[in-house]
Image (cartoon, helix red, strand yellow):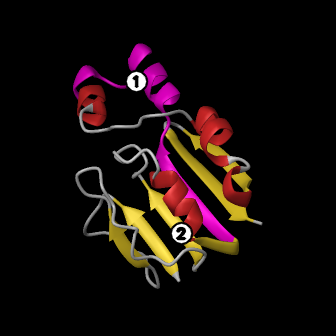
Protein backbone atom coordinates (compact mmCIF):
# COMPACT_ATOMS: atom_id res chain seq x y z
CA UNK A 1 0.00 0.00 0.00
CA UNK A 2 1.17 3.52 -0.83
CA UNK A 3 -0.17 6.51 1.10
CA UNK A 4 -0.02 10.23 0.32
CA UNK A 5 -0.85 12.64 3.17
CA UNK A 6 -1.32 16.26 2.16
CA UNK A 7 -3.23 19.43 2.94
CA UNK A 8 -3.88 20.01 -0.76
CA UNK A 9 -7.23 18.28 -1.26
CA UNK A 10 -7.09 18.37 -5.07
CA UNK A 11 -3.55 16.98 -5.38
CA UNK A 12 -2.77 13.28 -5.75
CA UNK A 13 0.04 10.96 -6.82
CA UNK A 14 -0.79 8.13 -9.23
CA UNK A 15 -0.81 4.78 -7.45
CA UNK A 16 -1.13 6.33 -3.98
CA UNK A 17 -4.14 6.49 -1.68
CA UNK A 18 -4.59 10.12 -0.63
CA UNK A 19 -5.35 10.88 3.03
CA UNK A 20 -6.21 14.56 3.49
CA UNK A 21 -4.88 16.60 6.40
CA UNK A 22 -7.83 18.85 7.18
CA UNK A 23 -8.26 21.17 10.15
CA UNK A 24 -5.15 19.70 11.77
CA UNK A 25 -6.40 16.11 11.60
CA UNK A 26 -5.72 13.16 9.32
CA UNK A 27 -7.57 9.88 9.70
CA UNK A 28 -4.81 7.26 9.68
CA UNK A 29 -6.65 4.91 12.04
CA UNK A 30 -7.95 2.79 9.14
CA UNK A 31 -4.45 1.98 7.92
CA UNK A 32 -3.21 -1.40 9.16
CA UNK A 33 0.11 -1.13 11.02
CA UNK A 34 3.15 -2.27 9.04
CA UNK A 35 1.18 -2.34 5.78
CA UNK A 36 2.67 0.52 3.76
CA UNK A 37 5.60 0.20 1.41
CA UNK A 38 5.73 3.95 0.77
CA UNK A 39 4.29 6.96 2.60
CA UNK A 40 4.60 10.57 1.46
CA UNK A 41 3.79 13.32 3.97
CA UNK A 42 3.74 16.64 2.15
CA UNK A 43 3.29 19.98 3.94
CA UNK A 44 1.27 18.26 6.67
CA UNK A 45 3.46 17.94 9.76
CA UNK A 46 3.10 21.67 10.38
CA UNK A 47 -0.69 21.38 10.55
CA UNK A 48 -1.05 18.27 12.72
CA UNK A 49 -2.75 18.95 16.05
CA UNK A 50 -2.22 15.39 17.32
CA UNK A 51 1.21 15.18 19.00
CA UNK A 52 1.38 11.46 18.18
CA UNK A 53 0.65 11.95 14.46
CA UNK A 54 4.22 11.19 13.35
CA UNK A 55 4.35 8.04 15.52
CA UNK A 56 1.12 6.88 13.86
CA UNK A 57 2.70 7.45 10.45
CA UNK A 58 5.82 5.51 11.50
CA UNK A 59 3.66 2.57 12.60
CA UNK A 60 2.07 2.37 9.13
CA UNK A 61 5.41 1.68 7.42
CA UNK A 62 6.35 -1.95 6.91
CA UNK A 63 9.88 -3.34 7.13
CA UNK A 64 12.05 -1.80 4.38
CA UNK A 65 9.23 0.66 3.69
CA UNK A 66 10.01 4.29 2.87
CA UNK A 67 8.71 7.50 4.43
CA UNK A 68 9.24 10.72 2.51
CA UNK A 69 8.43 14.00 4.29
CA UNK A 70 8.32 17.48 2.78
CA UNK A 71 7.74 20.69 4.67
CA UNK A 72 8.85 24.21 5.40
CA UNK A 73 11.93 24.77 7.53
CA UNK A 74 11.16 27.28 10.29
CA UNK A 75 14.76 28.47 10.65
CA UNK A 76 15.09 29.16 6.92
CA UNK A 77 11.70 30.88 6.87
CA UNK A 78 12.72 33.15 9.75
CA UNK A 79 16.08 33.93 8.14
CA UNK A 80 14.24 34.84 4.95
CA UNK A 81 11.99 37.14 6.94
CA UNK A 82 14.87 38.78 8.85
CA UNK A 83 16.86 39.38 5.64
CA UNK A 84 13.84 40.78 3.81
CA UNK A 85 13.51 37.95 1.29
CA UNK A 86 10.06 37.20 2.74
CA UNK A 87 7.74 40.15 3.43
CA UNK A 88 5.39 40.61 6.38
CA UNK A 89 2.28 39.59 4.47
CA UNK A 90 3.69 36.30 3.19
CA UNK A 91 5.32 35.45 6.52
CA UNK A 92 2.08 36.05 8.44
CA UNK A 93 0.04 34.16 5.85
CA UNK A 94 2.37 31.20 6.20
CA UNK A 95 2.49 30.92 10.00
CA UNK A 96 -1.21 31.70 10.57
CA UNK A 97 -2.63 28.17 10.44
CA UNK A 98 0.40 26.08 11.34
CA UNK A 99 0.42 24.17 14.64
CA UNK A 100 3.87 22.53 14.63
CA UNK A 101 6.47 24.55 12.80
CA UNK A 102 9.95 23.11 13.10
CA UNK A 103 13.37 23.09 11.53
CA UNK A 104 15.00 20.27 9.60
CA UNK A 105 17.72 19.24 12.05
CA UNK A 106 15.65 19.32 15.26
CA UNK A 107 12.95 17.32 13.42
CA UNK A 108 15.59 14.77 12.42
CA UNK A 109 17.16 14.50 15.86
CA UNK A 110 14.13 14.60 18.13
CA UNK A 111 11.31 13.18 16.02
CA UNK A 112 12.71 10.84 13.38
CA UNK A 113 16.10 9.15 13.71
CA UNK A 114 15.91 5.83 15.55
CA UNK A 115 12.20 6.00 16.35
CA UNK A 116 10.39 2.73 15.65
CA UNK A 117 13.34 1.39 13.64
CA UNK A 118 13.45 4.40 11.32
CA UNK A 119 16.76 5.30 9.66
CA UNK A 120 17.25 8.55 7.78
CA UNK A 121 18.46 7.98 4.22
CA UNK A 122 18.44 11.57 3.04
CA UNK A 123 17.84 15.03 4.51
CA UNK A 124 17.94 18.03 2.17
CA UNK A 125 17.17 21.69 2.52
CA UNK A 126 16.35 23.70 -0.60
CA UNK A 127 15.58 27.32 0.22
CA UNK A 128 12.91 27.14 2.92
CA UNK A 129 11.72 23.63 1.96
CA UNK A 130 13.05 20.43 3.52
CA UNK A 131 12.87 16.82 2.37
CA UNK A 132 13.52 13.89 4.67
CA UNK A 133 13.58 10.33 3.32
CA UNK A 134 13.61 7.45 5.82
CA UNK A 135 13.51 3.66 5.71
CA UNK A 136 12.20 1.31 8.36
CA UNK A 137 14.62 -1.49 9.18
The image quadrant of residue 134 is bottom right
Q: Secondary structure at mark 2?
A: strand
Q: Which mark is residue 32?
A: none
Check disc 2 and report the residue beneath it.
39
Above or below: residue 109 compared with residue 31: above
Q: Residue 9 vs residue 110: left or right? A: left
Callout 1 touching callout 2 (CB < 8 Å): no
In the rendered image, which quarter contains the C terminus? bottom right
Q: Residue 125 vs residue 8: left or right? A: right
| 96 inside magenta stretch | no
Check disc 1 and report the residue beneath it.
85
The 10 Å Cα crowd at callout 2, few under 14, some 14 to 19, many 20 or more, is: many
The image quadrant of residue 36 is bottom right
Where residue 87 appears, as percent x and y from the top left, is 29, 23
Residue shown at the point (32%, 69%) measured from the top left: 11
Residue shown at the point (35%, 70%) measured from the top left: 19
Viewer-proximal residue, 127 or 12?
Answer: 12
Where residue 50 appears, as percent x and y from the top left, is 38, 48
Where residue 80 appears, as percent x and y from the top left, is 44, 23
Q: Residue furthest top?
A: 82
Q: Residue furthest right?
A: 137
Q: For the magenta stretch, what is the residue range? A: 65-89
Q: Secondary structure at mark 1?
A: loop
Residue 12 visible (yes or no): no
Residue shown at the point (57%, 65%) measured from the top left: 59
Amino acid sequence: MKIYITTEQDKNIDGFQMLPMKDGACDVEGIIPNSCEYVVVEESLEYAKDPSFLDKVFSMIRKNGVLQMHGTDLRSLCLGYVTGEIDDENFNKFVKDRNNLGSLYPILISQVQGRQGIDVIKADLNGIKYEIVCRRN
